[in-house]
Image (cartoon, rainbow, N blue to C red):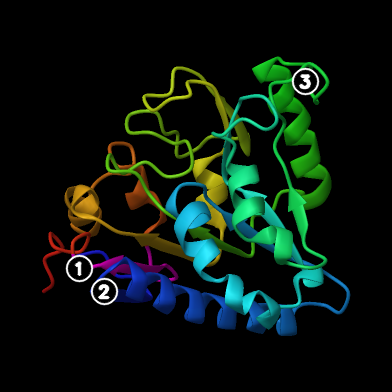
C-alpha cells in the first residue's frame, strides 16, 4: 500500500468538507505565517467538487485567512469563452473567492479572440506558459487542493495521456475524453514537484480508482497515483475509501 502523510475517512460529504476545510485553512494560515513578509503563498485548486462543493462550504470561514497573502491558481481550465458555465475559474470565484478580500486569482486564458492567444489553444497555452514562468520560474505551487475523476484523472491529465518527464509546465489538451474537448493544464511534473498536495474526493464512483492508486497503480494508467506520497494529505468519504485495502 502507498504511504501518505494523512488518510482520513469521513462518513459523508458534509463531514468530509468540514474536516478538509478546517484542516486546510489552518495549514494555509501556517504557511502564510512561515512565508517571507509581503510575499504570497501559491495555492493551487482544481475545479469540480472542490470549486462547487468544498469551497462554498467554507464561506463562513473566509475571514479566517489573510487572502492578501495568497495567490490562487487553477490546475486546469476548460478552453471556452469567458462567462461559459464550464469555466473552473468562474465557479471558484463565484463559489468562494469573491469574498476573499485581497486574493490574487490567476486565470488561464479563455477562447475569446480578445483573450491572450486570440482564440488559439496553442497560442493561449504559450501565453499562459509565459505568465507561469514570470511568476513561478522553475518552481511549483506551495500547496494544492484537488479532486479527481472516476477514471483517476487529475487536473486535465487523463489515463494513457501522462508524460512523467514532460518538460513544459503548461500543456494544451485536445480531444479530452471528458467534455469540453479543449483544455489547458499544468503538467504532471509540476504536480509532483508541489511539496504538499491535498486530495479530497467522495462517492462510490471514485472507489475503484482510489483503491488502485493506493495499491500502487502506475501514474501512466491512473494519473492520481502520480501525486500520492509521504507528503500527500488524503481525505475521503466512506464510499470513495471502500476499496482501499489497509495492511
Residue ID at (37%, 41%): 153
Label 3 or label 1, whichever lies nearer to me, is 1
Q: Circle 3 sits in a helix, a strand or a loop, which is it?
A: loop
Q: Earlier in the sequence, mark 3 or mark 1?
A: 3
Which residue is nearer to you in this view: 132 or 102?
102
Task: Give yes or no for contact between labels 2 and 3 (Cβ–Cβ under 8 Å).
Answer: no
Task: Give yes or no for contact between labels 3 and 1 (Cβ–Cβ under 8 Å).
Answer: no
Q: Earlier in the sequence, mark 2 or mark 1?
A: 2
Q: CA distance from mark 2 to mark 3?
A: 43 Å
Range covered by the magenta-colored residues:
229-238
Locate residue 214 relative to residue 122 in the image: left or right: left
Mark number for residue 238?
Answer: 1
Q: Circle 2 sits in a helix, a strand or a loop, which is it?
A: strand
Q: Position of residue 123 (x, y in %)?
A: 73, 19
Locate residue 2 relative to residue 127 in the image: left or right: left
Residue ID at (50%, 19%): 174
Q: Position of residue 184 (x, y in %)?
A: 59, 31
Q: Is residue 163 visible?
A: yes
Q: CA distance from mark 2 to mark 1?
A: 6 Å
Task: Give yes or no for contact between labels 2 and 1 (Cβ–Cβ under 8 Å).
Answer: yes
Q: Is residue 43 above or below residue 187?
A: below
Q: CA distance from mark 3 to mark 1?
A: 43 Å
The quadrant the C terminus occupies is bottom left
Local crowd at mark 3 within 10 Å, few (<14), some, or many (≥20)?
some
Q: Circle 1 sits in a helix, a strand or a loop, which is it?
A: loop
Residue ID at (32%, 51%): 225
Q: Is residue 216 visible?
A: no
Disc 2 marks which residue? 9
Disc 3 marks which residue? 117
Amino acid at each position: 500500500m502507498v504511504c501518505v502523510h494523512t488518510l482520513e475517512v469521513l462518513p459523508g460529504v458534509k463531514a468530509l468538507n468540514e474536516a478538509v476545510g478546517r484542516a486546510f485553512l489552518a495549514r494555509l494560515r501556517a504557511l502564510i505565517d512561515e512565508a517571507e513578509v509581503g510575499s504570497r503563498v501559491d495555492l493551487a485548486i482544481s475545479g469540480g467538487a472542490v470549486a462547487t462543493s468544498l469551497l462554498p462550504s467554507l464561506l463562513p470561514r473566509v475571514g479566517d485567512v489573510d487572502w492578501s497573502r495568497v495567490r490562487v491558481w487553477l490546475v486546469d481550465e476548460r478552453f471556452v469563452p469567458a462567462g461559459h458555465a464550464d469555466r473552473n475559474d468562474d465557479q471558484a470565484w463565484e463559489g468562494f473567492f469573491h469574498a476573499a478580500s485581497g486574493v490574487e486569482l490567476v486565470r488561464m486564458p479563455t477562447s475569446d479572440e480578445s483573450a491572450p492567444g486570440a482564440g488559439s489553444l496553442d497560442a493561449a497555452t504559450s501565453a499562459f506558459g509565459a505568465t507561469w514562468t514570470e511568476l513561478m520560474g522553475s518552481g511549483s505551487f506551495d500547496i494544492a487542493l484537488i479532486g479527481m475523476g472516476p477514471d483517476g484523472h487529475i487536473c486535465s491529465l487523463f489515463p494513457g495521456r501522462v508524460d512523467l518527464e514532460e518538460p513544459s509546465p503548461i500543456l494544451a489538451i485536445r480531444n479530452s475524453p471528458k467534455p469540453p474537448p479543449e483544455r489547458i493544464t499544468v503538467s504532471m511534473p509540476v504536480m509532483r514537484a508541489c511539496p504538499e498536495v491535498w486530495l479530497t474526493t467522495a462517492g462510490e464512483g471514485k472507489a475503484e480508482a482510489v483503491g488502485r492508486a493506493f495499491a500502487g497503480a502506475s501514474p501512466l494508467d491512473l494519473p492520481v497515483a502520480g501525486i500520492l506520497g509521504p507528503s500527500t494529505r488524503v481525505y475521503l468519504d466512506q464510499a470513495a475509501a471502500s476499496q482501499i485495502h489497509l495492511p
